[in-house]
Image (cartoon, rainbow, N blue to C red):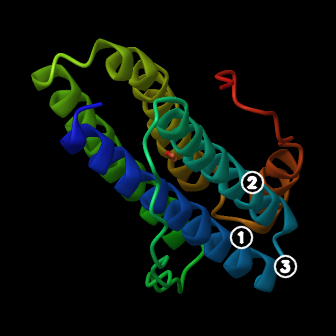
Amino acid sequence: MDQKVAGLLNDQVNKELYSAYLYLDMANFYAGQGLDGFANWYEIQAKEEQDHAMLMYRYLHNNGETVTLGAIDKPDKEFKALPDPLKAAHEHEQYVTSLINAIYDAAQAAKDHRTMQFLDWFVKEQGEEEKNSADLIRKMELFGGDAKGLYMLNSELAGRVYSAPSLQL
Ligand code: FEO
């Protein structure tokens, strides 16, 4: 495997685990505010990020590469108002999309078609992640302004259930 591509994928394992940790911190914030539905949403988001890391980890191993695990950064975003994590999540997903695109570009430059095909799933997933995070901001703007609307939104988010990723390695 091209070593630049392998290195970027290895870094991304760490970054996906950081994403999981960041989302756990968002769940933690909402749990502290008594919003168990919002907390549930981000706990599931954290699980999905662990899945992303494991897909990349397995892909590297399946292609004969070694994986080096580094320290995971402390979540450093400060949340004060209720919409803060929603906005931070959307910005974070836009950043992750840029990282996935950069790995894709490197795979393309190395003519690594297998990795490009592997990353296709992540490109699509990022489209969904960005849509979901933008939708949540919009819902909060529309309905989160009064206690009844916030209660309904919290109940809706409480209904999110975890499902394993559609990509399996
Ligand atoms: Fe692993 Fe939320 O992207």
Pick the front one: 37 or 51: 51
Decide: few, some or many residues near mark 1? Use Cα within 10 Å; few <14, some 14-19, many ≥20. Answer: many
Whether residue 150 appears in this view of the structure is yes
Please state the horizontal and vertical placement of residue 144, each as a whole percent of the image.
66, 59
Circle 2 SS class: helix
How far separated are the C-alphas under marks 1 and 3? 11 Å
In the image, what residue type sits under mark 1?
Ala
Decide: few, some or many residues near mark 2? Use Cα within 10 Å; few <14, some 14-19, many ≥20. Answer: many
> Under 8 Å from ligand 1: the CB of mark 3?
no
- Which residue is pictured at 14% across the width and 24% down the height? 110
In the image, what residue type sits under mark 2?
Trp
In the image, what residue type sits under mark 3?
Gly
Residue to which mark 3 is pinned: 34
Please state the horizontal and vertical placement of residue 132, each as a whole percent of the image.
56, 38
CB atoms at circles 2 and 1 under 8 Å apart?
yes
Residue to which mark 2 is pinned: 41
Circle 1 SS class: helix
Q: Is residue 28 above or below residue 168?
A: below
How far separated are the C-alphas under marks 2 and 3? 13 Å
Q: Is residue 28 above or below residue 40?
A: below
Instruction: Using the image, tell me which numbered label, if any, was put on residue 27.
Output: 1
Q: Nearer the viewer, mark 1 or mark 3?
A: 1
